[in-house]
Image: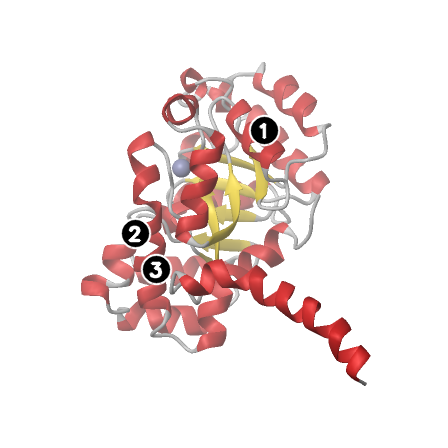
Amino acid sequence: MIKQLYRLVPALLLSACSVLPVAAAGQSIPLFDAHVHYSSDAWKKYSVDEVLAILDQAGVERALVSSTPDDGTLKLFEAAPERVVPELRPYRTGADMGTWHSDPSILPYLEERLRRGIYRGIGEFHLSADKAATPVVRRVIELAVERQIPLHAHSDEKAVAALFAVDRRVKILWAHAGMSTPVQAVGEMLDRYSNLWVELSYRLDEVAPGGRVSPAWRTLFQRHPDRFLFGSDTWTPGRWPQVPALANAARAWLKELPPDLAAAIAFRNAERLYGTSKP
Ligand SMILES: [Zn+2]
């Protein structure tokens, strides 16, 4: 019996240690950040070790990362494959942002990179409704459906509807909940499309004005508890130092929700959508 205990103690200590750094920082809710970029302007300013330290400080245990160019994602993924979920943007450089949807040369680029088998999503991309059914975008949708990986769209509700009109089977993570889409319309989209998930970066002022969850958003979270994801969005280098504060702001309003719902939005919904283990 005593021998068994001795054998147990190191295991218990080890498991306690693995949760201590997060608990010690008072960050009881681990986060899966579903909107991270490590683009060239950021990697020139912050090393891989520095951004991983920021994620540590923020209690972000896993992160959906896409970058312009894609090399930024690969640098982070190489250093932390268990933490980084790579996502492939249709942007070779920033110049592709406004033209990718109509540029056939994007397709061989995406197909070649996707063959590496590490990417769990395509995006984040910017797309308006009038460009959502071009031959290039149709092929991108096809690639996502074939691989059963979600698109990550920075789009309004019309563009999201247009993407689903091409193929209802595609999964879409909706960046910023449409950015300016009212809560009622977000709810209508979720009711209509069972393959739609909503990521909440840049919506803090509406979701939790003054730090308290708005009743309308709370009702929507309860109606669709498995479809919301936390995101910070490090689209510019200046966002990186803000990630710990953004994470804590999210925790503050998440704590107002029932623990199960909070854990789903903080982590579990993203884990369900992007997978749980090492690639
Ligand atoms: Zn973004």
Q: Secondary structure at mark 1?
A: helix
Dot 2 crowding, Cα within 10 Å, few <14, some 14–19, many 20+: few
Q: Position of residue 101 (x, y in %)?
A: 49, 24
User: How is the rendered protein coloured?
Assistant: secondary structure
Q: Is residue 191 visible?
A: no
Badge 3 crowding class, 10 Å Cα cut-off, few under 14, some 14 to 19, many 20 or more, is many
Q: Which residue is mark 2?
A: 245
- Say what amino acid the circle numbered 3 marks: Ala
What SS does tag 3 mark? helix
The residue that label 3 is drawn on is 250
Distance, label 3 to label 2, CA atoms, is 9 Å
Asked if residue 233 lies left or right of residue 3, the reply is: left
Q: Does 241 sit above or below residue 48?
A: below
Q: Where the N terminus falls, by quadrant?
A: bottom right
Q: Amino acid at mark 2?
A: Ala
Q: Is residue 76 above or below residue 58?
A: above
Image disc number at residue 276: none
Crowd band around label 1 with a 10 angstrom C-alpha radius: few (<14), some (14–19), many (20+)? many
Q: Are marks 1 and 3 in contact (CB under 8 Å)?
A: no
In primary-sequence order, the first of circles 3 and 2 is 2
The Cα atoms of the two marked residues, 1 and 3, are separated by: 27 Å
Amino acid at circle 1: Leu
Q: Position of residue 235 (x, y in %)?
A: 36, 34
Q: Where in the figure is residue 115, as x and y percent of width and height?
A: 73, 27
The residue at 60%/49% (across/down) is: 168
Splitting the image into four quadrants, where does ligand 1 fall? Answer: top left
Instruction: Identify the residue shown where x is 36% and y is 54%.
Output: 247
Nearer the observer, disc 3 or disc 2?
Answer: 2
Quadrant in the picture for residue 234: top left
Judged left or right of residue 111, residue 54 is left
Residue position marked by numbered label 1 in the rendering: 74
